[in-house]
Amino acid sequence: MVFSVNSAQSLGGSQKTESSQPIHLSQGPQFQGKASKRMHVMAKPIGAVCNIDCNYCYYLSKQDLLEYKKGCSPEMDEGLLEQYIKNYIEGQNTPEIIFSWQGGEPTMLGLSYFEKVVELQKKYQPVGIKISNDLQTNGTLLDDKWCEFLAKNQFLVGLSIDGPQMLHDAYRTNRAGRGTHKQVMKAVELLHKHKVSFATLTCVNNLTSKNPLEVYRFLRDEVRSPQMQFIPIVEQKSFRTTAPQTWKSNEQLKQGDKRLIPGNANSIMESWCVSDEAWGNFLIAIFDEWIQRDIGRVFVQYFEASVETWMGRKNPLCTLGQLCGKGLAMEPNGDVYSCDHYVYPEYKIGNINETKLETMAYSQVQQNFGFAKSKTLTAQCQQCDYQFACYGECPKNRFIKTRTGEPGLNYLCAGWKKFFSHADKAIAYILRATGNPVAHGNYSDQAIRNVGFATKF
Ligand code: SF4
Ligand code: SF4
């Protein structure tokens, strides 16, 4: 295929790239003569503890919300680590088992901790099964030794970098308030030097969103990013204490309300967030440059995923797919939550000291969580031309009302719609020019048959 779509391995950050199929044990594909079982956990062996202090970090506040304040160790001890690795492997029946390590900053645990991880994985590795790892990091603690280890053990690294120095250092600061860009660029060079597989994770906030091409060109030309992931930063001021979907529906603001714009007077949003319009504009500016000169050689996760959906395939990203629920999150004390974005007491589904991971992953509660993404779409989403590519995006962001007053619309809706309607024609054109089907959109094969190719293009 023309585009370098990669849906095989998830990286950290805000979304999973695993298939978003619901979990059924009794049906579906088989592996080694038994029902195939697959799950994904984002393990946070050091919880929210981090060596830097990014202003917009959604996870640092978990230190107050969860058990940390009650004096529990922020580090997953070796006994629990072994139990987790054993449990995670035994709960799956699939050719490849993928471990994801996140924080906080997981490299604060030290290299020896991850050497132990690999040793334990080998101890429990079933014959004929591949074990892979990915690690999300701010890069500031990486050195030659770390990179040798990561390369040798084929870790996929997710490196957080927000673009050129001025934009990155605006929020990604150390505890003394100084920017971390220099250190991260040192990590970039080390990752290249040791040929470590990596992707960049870039937060799209109120500043980066206004400088799309500066960000994109920097990642492409200076970082030589093998894979770009962009993460829209969306948090209401109440996010530290209020779990998603526990919002009062009668208090939700209507799409277009000025109080939804970050930085406006009386805004309900954190000032560092991206606005819906700015999100759409950011994607469009980068998409136009990508499609004109970089397609096929620069991997931008959202664009590749969109191309897949236009072809009629499932979206490989959970945020834009039909279902949630396959990516659990685990804290250092073994507490497990429905998703990385739902680490709130209301969404705790168990603890690995008491319940097997597979029991939690395949539980009715978790299935309900997964299906709710499609079941709770607003009428506006159900009638949307781009439902196939968006599915109401991540439920964590569904805290506004449609213009007709229905609650539960996604905050980013206007931006997504703007981007999808902008990209529609170009994606259809490229697909058709490369002999691929165009299953969806206003320029789909069906639409062309109905109105005639010449009229549509
Ligand atoms: S809530 Fe759903 S869409 Fe959002 S990150 Fe979690 S699994 Fe993905
Ligand atoms: S673009 Fe908006 S209306 Fe369309 S599916 Fe996405 S959130 Fe719903």
Image (cartoon, rainbow, N blue to C red):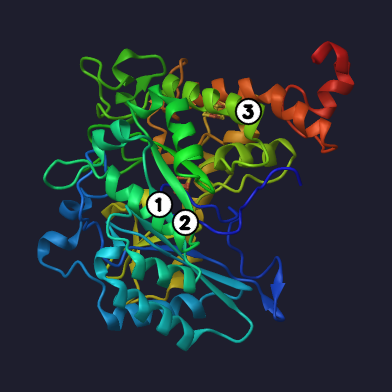
Q: In this orientation, which residue lies closer to the viewer: 143 or 175? A: 143
Above/below status of 374 relative to 333: above
Q: Residue at x 40, y 26 (%)?
A: 209
Label count reads 3
Q: In this orientation, which residue lies closer to the viewer: 26 or 141? A: 141
Distance CA(mark 3)–CA(mark 1)? 36 Å
Rendered location of residue 225, percent (x, y): 50, 46
Above/below status of 209 relative to 163: above
Instruction: Give whichever of discs 2 and 3 has the lower sequence position.
Output: 2
**Where residue 188 is drawn, which disc sits there?**
1
Residue to which mark 2 is pinned = 192
Check contact, mark 2 vs mark 1: CB within 8 A: yes
Distance CA(mark 2)–CA(mark 3)? 38 Å
Q: Quadrant of the C terminus?
A: top right
Q: Is mark 1 within 8 Å of ligand 1?
A: no
Rendered location of residue 68, percent (x, y): 16, 61
Q: Amino acid at mark 1?
A: Val
Rendered location of residue 268, percent (x, y): 25, 25
Q: Is mark 3 within 8 Å of ligand 2?
A: yes
Question: Residue 379, can we see it?
Answer: no
Q: Residue at x 47, y 68 (%)?
A: 151
**Where residue 271 is drawn, which disc sits there?**
none
Instruction: Give whichever of discs 3 and 1 has the lower sequence position.
Output: 1
* Secondary structure under the numbered disc 2 in the rendered image: helix
Q: Amino acid at mark 3?
A: Tyr
Q: Residue at x 45, y 47 (%)?
A: 200
Q: Amino acid at mark 2?
A: His
* Secondary structure under the numbered disc 1 in the rendered image: helix
